[in-house]
Image: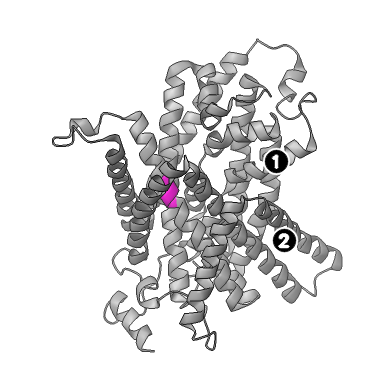
Amino acid sequence: MTQQSNTNSASTPAGTGPVRLHRTLGLWHLIIIGMVIVQPTAPMGIYGVISNKGHGHVVTCIFIAMIAMLFTAIGYGRMARVYPSAGSAYTYVGQEIHSGLGYVVGWSTMLAYLLNPLICTAFCAKAAMNILPGILNMIPGLSNISPGLSFYVWILFFAAFFTWTNLRGIKTSAKLDEALCIGMTIVVVLFLACVIRTVWGAHHDPSFFTLPFYDPAYFKSSYLYAGTSVAVLSYIGFDAVSTLSEEVENPRRNIMLATVLLCLIAGLMSGLEVYAAQLIWGSKPFPSNVVESAFAMVSRLAGGVVLFQIINFTLLIANMGSGMGSQLAAGRLLYGMGRGNALPKSFFGVISAKHRIPRNNILLIGAIAVAGSGLMELFSAKLGGGAYEIGAQCLVFGTLVAFMGVNASSFVHLCRHEENRNPIALSFALSIPLLGFIICAVLWCSVSYASMVMGGLWLVVGIAYGFVRTKGFRSELVNFDIPPDVD
């Protein structure tokens, strides 16, 4: 009781009730924020990897991954109808299955949500160094700064910018995300126009235009599976909109629509982008030294040096948007866990009365992004770049644990509350979360050994923290507060 009073006094104006997140977002805002986190240019960064693993069948891999993620998106939407909470997967699992499992899922999800802003900050710093190598030399006193030190200046700049934007309030973030999304979409349209200009009239055999879907000379089912396991990364982040449930008008309707529509839009856009790229490049493998920049290389073939530079700059902008969006979502997840007492409530469960945001969490995530990306750079220098790959795989580790948890909670909810439904309709409904869980479990088992170890250590730390916090699990670890649908 004392802790609750302290929390309220720190965040509530005199004479009012507890300050909550403000419901100001509509369906369109949700989709835009989700698209910026997922990125309209999502397949560009991993295009070469999917192409090599899938032996050219990038489009097919993208669409199979889209179907797989739609199962999970439906699960998120269904559970958001029942529990419109910022805690997202943490709340769903804790309410439907067990509070302890909810805590474990929330802790694992926290790994992914903390890593995404960190990785985006590091990527933006690297991209800025490549695109604007001389900008620091224009600043008095920094003309002799070393490249190594300039990286740390850039990560400080980007982390500060992401944090400042998210401290301005959810409406400010939504407006900026809308501008970023429009800009990235324009670049995608420009790329498609260049591809059409290149292939128009150059190929008269209709079978040429079906090769990106199925090329008999390169097809093998094992290749398709390997490519799909990577293509799933194109959709990582769509679940973040569920953490905004307490800032959405009519969340029981809009979260379901947003998650499903987001998967469909991201899948169709990604499929169109890689289809166009495959028409230029074909099914032949990319050399190992250009895999990471494969899409930019294809853009050079389609539109010359100008398009090549535009694509590179767009990838920087895309990661800026993803970094801001993922920090936004991470702050809400930490707030949900803090309010539920899974984390110290006096710090994580506080809402700023002025902007109605979890300010403490936003500031903490910004600090983690600076420190974490700096440490990752140091380890990467020692591991030959391996730290970034491990970090990305750990992000997938945490995300897929959340996906499995959401599908499991959706399955349990249907079993408990839909027993009067028509048996055929119920069987169909149950098959969706079951298939979603199985697919995510298979993909989770495919992450690297190093990421399994790092993710496992993170879970051990979380369980140890929970053990200490509850004095050997002798008291309740978490409780769940589901806010009203309106302010």
Q: Element type at marker 1?
A: helix
Q: How many marks?
A: 2
Between discs 2 and 1, the one toward the N terminus: 1
What secondary structure do most residues of the magenta stretch adopt?
helix
Q: Does residue 115 belong to the magenta stretch?
A: no
Q: Give percent across and percent down for residue 142.
A: 18, 36
* Residue kind at label 2, given as amino acid type: Pro
User: Quarter-wise, where is residue 75 in the image?
Assistant: bottom right
Q: Element type at marker 2?
A: helix
- What is the quadrant of the N terminus in the image? bottom left
* Residue kind at label 1, given as amino acid type: Ala
| Badge 2: residue crowd in 10 Å (few <14, some 14–19, many ≥20) | many
Q: Give percent across and percent down for residue 45.
A: 53, 36
Q: Give percent across and percent down for residue 393.
A: 56, 50
User: For mark 1, what is the residue?
Assistant: 226
Q: Residue furthest left?
A: 140
- Toward the viewer: 227 or 37? 227
Reply above or below: 109 against 65.
below
Reply above or below: 314 against 154.
above
Instruction: Locate residue 368 relative to residue 87 in the image: left or right.
Output: left
Is residue 250 at least partly visible in the picture? no
User: Quarter-wise, where is residue 220 in the image?
Assistant: top right
Gap between marks 2 and 1 measured at Cα? 23 Å
User: For mark 2, what is the residue?
Assistant: 433
Tell me which residue sits at (65%, 31%) in the image: 52
Judge depth for marks 2 and 1 and give the one in front.
1
- Toward the viewer: 324 or 456? 456
